[in-house]
Amino acid sequence: MATAVAELTRKDFTSDQDVRWCPGCGDYSVLANVQRVMPELGVPRENFVFVSGIGCSSRFPYYMNTYGFHTIHGRAPAFATGIKASRPELSVWVVTGDGDGLSIGGNHLLHAIRRNLDLQILLFNNRVYGLTKGQYSPTSRMGMKTKSTPDGAIDHPIDPIAFALGAGATFVARTVDVDAPHLQEMLRRAHAHPGTAFVEILQNCPVYNDDEWLEVEDRKTRATAALTLADGQSLVFGEKGARRGIRIVDGLPSIVALPDGVDPVSLGVAVHNERHQTPAYAFALATLHRPEFPLPIGVFRAVETSTYDALLSAQVSDAIARRGTGDLRALLHSGDTWTVESGALEPD
Amino acid sequence: MPQKRVQEIQSVAIRFSGDSGDGIQLTGTKFTESTALAGNDLSTLPDFPAEIRAPAGTLAGVSGFQIHFSSEDIRTPADQPDVLVALNPAALRANIRDVRTSGTVIVNSDAFNAKSLKLAGYDHDPLPELRSRYQLVEIPLTRLNREALADLEISQRDADRSKNFFSLGVIYWLYNRPMESTLRWLESRFKGEVLEANVRVLKAGHAFGETTDLLPVSFVVPRAKIEPGVYRNITGNTALAWGIIAATVQAKCPVFLGAYPITPASDILHEVARFRHFGVKTFQAEDEIAAISAAIGASFAGMLGICTTSGPGMVLKQEALGLAVMAELPLVVVDVQRAGPSTGMPTKIEQGDLLMALYGRNSDSPVPVLAPSTPGDCFYTMLEAFSLAIAHMTPVIVLSDSYLANSAEPWRIPDVAALPRIDVSFAREAADFKPYARDPETLARPWAIPGTPGLEHRIGGLSKENVTGNVSYDAKNNETMVRLRAEKIARIANSIPPVEVDGPESGELLVVGWGGTHGAITSAVEAARREGLTVSSLHLRHLNPFPANLGAVLRSFRQVLVPELNLGQLVRLLRAEFLVPAEGLSKVQGQPFQVAEIQARIGSMLRGKG
């Protein structure tokens, strides 16, 4: 019997396994919020599949009482592609991290996004390798000193949002591990989006990179350090009395001060639009980084186009409609064949 | 015109050769179709360069296609061609040393000019000295071909491109082959001037054969005595692809094929992709790892997951394959082996991936390994691979090779109703469901797929607790699980047929082969018997686990010879597993065994023991 969708609660999504992240890990908050949102989505529990790679975040499926597949390092998007392309009716969620998704698995992440399969991809970004005990990751800041970079990291970091936009993502959002309402809203939006929904979750690693996102996690500093994106609203941030706005001219963002009572639009402050067909505007937002700029939080881009899973299924159903269901005997006998009669066994 | 003499012969091997832009593979394929329709047994082998268009006229650009046809049973494309068709000096130079002494060599004499000779690396015209050693037939092919098309509105370049069909016409006359199948094909493929040009030069070539003094005799190869049935030609790659389609039909379960383009396996993807109306989904992945990962994902979701690749791609798949071993999901992985190591010779032949298939993953992670023995056998091997994968919830490796992949043979089309069914049953019962509870006989775990209420569960690569499948770091449990998975694969030996010995069941010498060397080994054994030697042979389809009786059979012979196109991989396994003094015969030249090579070794092993 299918579980009645309306009756599902958070408990229905909690597995019987003990959660084994470090105390204070941001993953706890993400797990709790995912479990809270699942019952609201109108999907039977048995149709959820959580797929992960390797790393701390990739333990996630073990704690969800859904179907789950903890795969190999970096390849979760490829496994998810096979699942979703096979069974488009399933709700497939990929859980990955900055090392898993952007280092060893960068190629798969890129291609899953560009194919626009109807997946939800949650990338937990703590800017460090946790499970292997503290090496720098592809999102770590330059200069970061770790066991593998005692003199400081000399790689230029990659921004997950910019990566996803570059891959042609149709839905890109950033949220924060401890901001439950916002995180839940992003999960709902991601699920509602038809196509690949990429969500970067800023996540704290209390052991190897503590307080990396403190400015945006902390209520006291958040208003200044973060730019909360809302469709149709101007790009405004800062405490009351010290509000500022983001102007984007020729793709280049800059900050303008906003005296109280002045309409930001009159000063050229951009109005957020998730639906620009080109990703240029969203990419400009993705270049906003601390400390020069506030860090944008919210939906960068949400546009719709065809999905790989739907097109693949349509090719199959179209082929069946056009040619009829395949006939093995007809296939084996197609093209040039010849018959050897039993008489041919005798010499001529 | 006086009627020319017609002579009956038992068999002949022809090698067509020319520049890779000359349409040699097409010429060979068309002659093969016609020969099959004429009722001969046959075997073919294409030999083409990896470069798509190497510089015209050079040795690097030479493309060849050999066909061996007969009124008797044959199993190989023949060691030495009786007839060589060489459309340019490079083709002559690349192939002449293979031709049987005093064989027939047909050349396009127009192509033997100073420039072409130099491109081919000749510092003098080789034809004069060949006249004494071969039946050299010098045909001004380019000129005759142009003359045949003189009144057509067609460029000289296009006219010259059709000269392969002129040479095909000559060969059709020489071996009294019907041209109808080729004419039908041309009509289905071309129209207008191009159709007219090709039809005209084909017929002109035929007419030239009839009238020229250069070819005084034509030959007839009578129909072979072949088991009754409906036949077609099939290559190993096509047979594998159709085996995949057959598996989806026999299992009533859709196939998901993940693949990344790689020579010589890509044609399987191309072929399967044509048949979406069988419900199959094909996925050209971003890389080899994604191809297998997606296929495993599809298996997890309840499809028949399969991926197709060749050696270098197989290396990349091994980590994901290890996960499929751990997750105990059905999956078929096809490795169409090619000459290596590394990139090696992508279009050439080798059997070098056996040990990788068995042992190429971290830790103890056994999987069943199967190898087809002929192009047609690829079809049945694929069906068996899916059947084993599903019945035992395990990935299965199929080791084909580029010889099987590209060579063609007549194949008796099976009766679809008689093909084995593949039983797929998904877990449904939620009460007391345990993801790693096992079938007491096969040790297979249940296949519980997403969308089934109450069976929600998690799998993955971490060590699993017995029965529940929960993550476990318990020391004893890990050993239990490693042993259970090994035992599960070992028990497959109970369900596969015992090996059958061809020849006496015990004695002095047993020749053991596997995979695409079947034809050469069988032919060599038969040839040795015709010499009066007593020798037995067996051919392994199941490389892991070995058939249950293999050890006893091996120990029934004083000597065991294992010919392989590698430096001795099966022989190492047999010696390790059964402690028998097996000897290897190795060849790693990117070419198949010649019958004579194996026959010579059989002879020396038997006579040496006098």
Image (cartoon, rainbow, N blue to C red):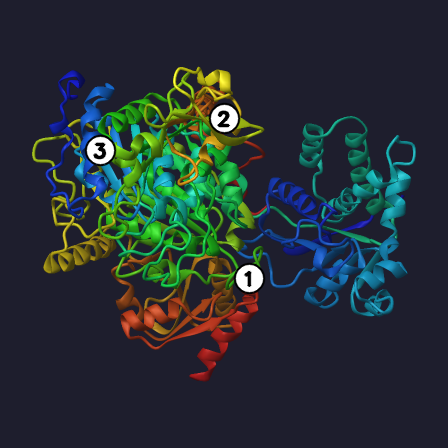
Which corner quadrant of the image does residue A262 belong to? top left
Q: Residue at x 33, y 20 (%)?
A: A192
The amino acid type of the residue labelled 2 equals Arg
Q: Nearer the viewer, mark 3 or mark 1?
A: 1
The amino acid type of the residue labelled 3 equals Phe
- Give the total number of marks visible in the rendering: 3
Q: Residue at x 34, y 68 (%)?
A: B573
Contact between labelled residues 2 and 3, with CB atoms less than 8 Å apart:
no
Left or right of residue B278: residue A8? left
Q: Position of residue A244 (x, y in %)?
A: 41, 26
Give A128 or B504, whichever is nearer the viewer.
A128
Q: Which chain does tag 2 point to?
A: A
Q: Position of residue B96 (x, y in %)?
A: 73, 64
Give B431 or A287, whichever is nearer the viewer.
A287
- Tell me the CA gap for discs 3 and 1: 42 Å
Q: Secondary structure at mark 2?
A: strand
Which corner quadrant of the image does residue A250 belong to? top right
The amino acid type of the residue labelled 1 equals Gly
Q: Where is the C terminus of chain A found, in terms of image quarters?
A: top right
Instruction: Say the numbered circle drawn on residue A247.
Output: 2
Left or right of residue B553: residue B156? right
Q: Which chain does tag 1 point to?
A: B
Q: Where is the N terminus of chain A found, in terms of image quarters?
A: top left
Q: Position of residue B135 (x, y in %)?
A: 79, 62
Left or right of residue B243: residue B302? left
**In the figure, B477 relative to A164: above or below?**
below
Q: Which chain does tag 3 point to?
A: B
- Tell me the CA gap for discs 2 and 1: 56 Å
Give A319 or B576, whichever is nearer the viewer.
A319
Check disc 3 and report the residue beneath it. B426
Q: Mark 1, residues whose alpha carbon is within 10 Å: few (<14), some, or many (≥20)?
A: few
